[in-house]
Image: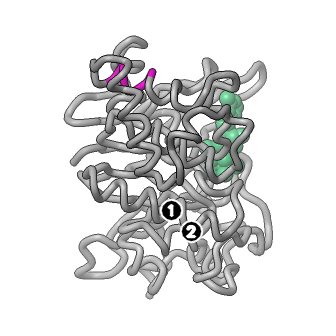
C-alpha cells in the first residue's frame, strides 16, 4: 500500500470551541490507483489532503490516527522532511492554478527550475525537459508557451502547466483537490483524461478530491464517500455508483440527473450538515436521512462490509443490519 490513513481524527480549536473536522477516517491508496474522495462542501476532503501534505493550519491538532506513506508515518516527520516529500514524492494540484504559479516568471523557467532542482541536471537540460513536459500535457507549440507568463494563458492551459509542474519529479502520489472545478465542461474532460493518462504512464497514484460524481465516474477506480468528516461508504466506483448502500450516497446520486454530465452541484439534499462543534451522538447523517431507525440517533454505525461476502464495498449504516 502506498498510502494508508488509519482512524484519523483532526480537530481545529478556536478561542471558544473545538471543531472535529475528521473523525476516524481510514483511506488507503495502492500503487498506480486513482481514488476519488467525494462529498459536499465541509465534508473534510481538503482537511484530509492537507493532513497528508503536512499543511494543516496552526490551530489544528491530531489527537489520534496515523498516515503511513511508503511505510513511514508522515505525521511524525519534521518540517524539513515534509517539505522534501512535497513536490518531489507527493505532487499537488489545486483548484486555482494561479496559486501554484509564480505570476512574474515565464512558464519555461518555472518548470525548468523545478526540474533542475528535483532531477539534479543542468539548467539547460532542465529547460529542454520543460519543453518536453509541456508537450506531454498536450500544449501545442510548447517553445512559444514556455516564453509566456501565466497571465497570458487560459485557465485550462494554466492547469495543464500546473499538472506538468506537479508531475515533473515525477511523484509517486498526486493529490488533486478539485483540479477541474474552475474549468468549463469540455476542458474538464480533457484535463481529467490527461491526468489519467499521465498517471498510468508514470505509475503515479492519484487522490482525486471532488464534489462531482461525474468526475469520479470518469476516472476513479475506487471511491470514498465522506460526510461531515467521516467516511460513510467506500468501494470500487462501479459498486458505489451502481449499488450505493448509504442513504447519503443514494441521495448524492439521486441529486445528479445525469452521471455522464459533470459539474452538477451536490445541493439537492434537504437539510444541513451537523454542527462539527457538537457532533451528534449517533449517525452523522441521521438528521437528514429519510430512512433512519431509532438506533441511528443513539449510536454511530461502524464502517463494515456492505453485505455478506463483500470484499471491497463498505458502508457505515444501521440499515445495513436491518436489511
Ligand atoms: N483552520 C481551520 N479552522 C477551523 N475550522 C476549519 C479549518 N480548516 C477547515 N475547517 C473546517 O473543517 C471542516 C472540513 O473542511 P474541508 O475544507 O476539509 O471541507 P471540504 O470537504 O474540502 O469542503 P470544500 O469542498 O468546500 O473545500 C469544515 O467545517 C471547515 O470549516
**Residue 280 visible in the current orientation:** no
Task: Examine the structure image and report whether residue 105 is included in the region drawn in magenta.
Answer: no
- Residue that appears at 63% across and 64% down: 187
Ligand 1 is found in the corner quadrant, namely top right
Looking at the picture, tell me which residue is in the foreground, 220 or 137: 137
* Above-or-below relation of 165 to 81: below
Residue at mark 2: 189
**Residue 1 visible in the current orientation:** yes
Answer few, some or many: residues within 10 Å of disc 2's Cα (few below 14, many 20 plus, some between 14 and 19). Answer: some
Looking at the picture, tell me which residue is in the foreground, 232 or 73: 73
Cβ atoms under marks 2 and 1 closer than 8 Å: yes
Which percent across, then down, holds residue 171?
33, 38
- Residue that appears at 35% across and 67% down: 304
- Residue that appears at 64% across and 80% down: 261
* Above-or-below relation of 268 to 139: below
Looking at the picture, tell me which residue is in the foreground, 170 or 47: 170
Inter-mark Cα distance, 2 to 1:
5 Å
Numbered circle sitting on residue 192: 1
Which percent across, then down, holds residue 41?
69, 54
* Above-or-below relation of 297 to 122: below
Region of the chain picked out in magenta, as a range = 113-118
Task: Examine the structure image and report whether residue 117 is included in the region drawn in magenta.
Answer: yes
- Residue that appears at 48% across and 80% down: 241
Amino acid at each position: 500500500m502506498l498510502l494508508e490513513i488509519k482512524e484519523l481524527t483532526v480537530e481545529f480549536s478556536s478561542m471558544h470551541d473545538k471543531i472535529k473536522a475528521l473523525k476516524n477516517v481510514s483511506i488507503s491508496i495502492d500503487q498506480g490507483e486513482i481514488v476519488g474522495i467525494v462529498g459536499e462542501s465541509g465534508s473534510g476532503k481538503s482537511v484530509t489532503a492537507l493532513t497528508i501534505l503536512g499543511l494543516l493550519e496552526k490551530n489544528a491538532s491530531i489527537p489520534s490516527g496515523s498516515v503511513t506513506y511508503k511505510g513511514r508515518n508522515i505525521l511524525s516527520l519534521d518540517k524539513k522532511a515534509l517539505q522534501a516529500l512535497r513536490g518531489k514524492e507527493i505532487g499537488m494540484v489545486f483548484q486555482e492554478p494561479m496559486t501554484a504559479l509564480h505570476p512574474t516568471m515565464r512558464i519555461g523557467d518555472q518548470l525548468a527550475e523545478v526540474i533542475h532542482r528535483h532531477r539534479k541536471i543542468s539548467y539547460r537540460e532542465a529547460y529542454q525537459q520543460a519543453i518536453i513536459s509541456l508537450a506531454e500535457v498536450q500544449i501545442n507549440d510548447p517553445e512559444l508557451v514556455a516564453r509566456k507568463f501565466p497571465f497570458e494563458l487560459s485557465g485550462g492551459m494554466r492547469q495543464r502547466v500546473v499538472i506538468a509542474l506537479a508531475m515533473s519529479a515525477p511523484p509517486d502520489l498526486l493529490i488533486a483537490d478539485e483540479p477541474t472545478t474552475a474549468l468549463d465542461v469540455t476542458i474538464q474532460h480533457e484535463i481529467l483524461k490527461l491526468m489519467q493518462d499521465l498517471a498510468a504512464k508514470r505509475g503515479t497514484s492519484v487522490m482525486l478530491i471532488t464534489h462531482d460524481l461525474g468526475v469520479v465516474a470518469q476516472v476513479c477506480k475506487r471511491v470514498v464517500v465522506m460526510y461531515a468528516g467521516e467516511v460513510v461508504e467506500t468501494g470500487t466506483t462501479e459498486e458505489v455508483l451502481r449499488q450505493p448502500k448509504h442513504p447519503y450516497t443514494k441521495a448524492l446520486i439521486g441529486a445528479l440527473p445525469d452521471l455522464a454530465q459533470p459539474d452538477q452541484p451536490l445541493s439537492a439534499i434537504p437539510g444541513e450538515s451537523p454542527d462539527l462543534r457538537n457532533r451528534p451522538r449517533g449517525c452523522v447523517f441521521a438528521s437528514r436521512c429519510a430512512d433512519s431507525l431509532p438506533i441511528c440517533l443513539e449510536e454511530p454505525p461502524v464502517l463494515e462490509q456492505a453485505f455478506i461476502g463483500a470484499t471491497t464495498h463498505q458502508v457505515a449504516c444501521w440499515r445495513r443490519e436491518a436489511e
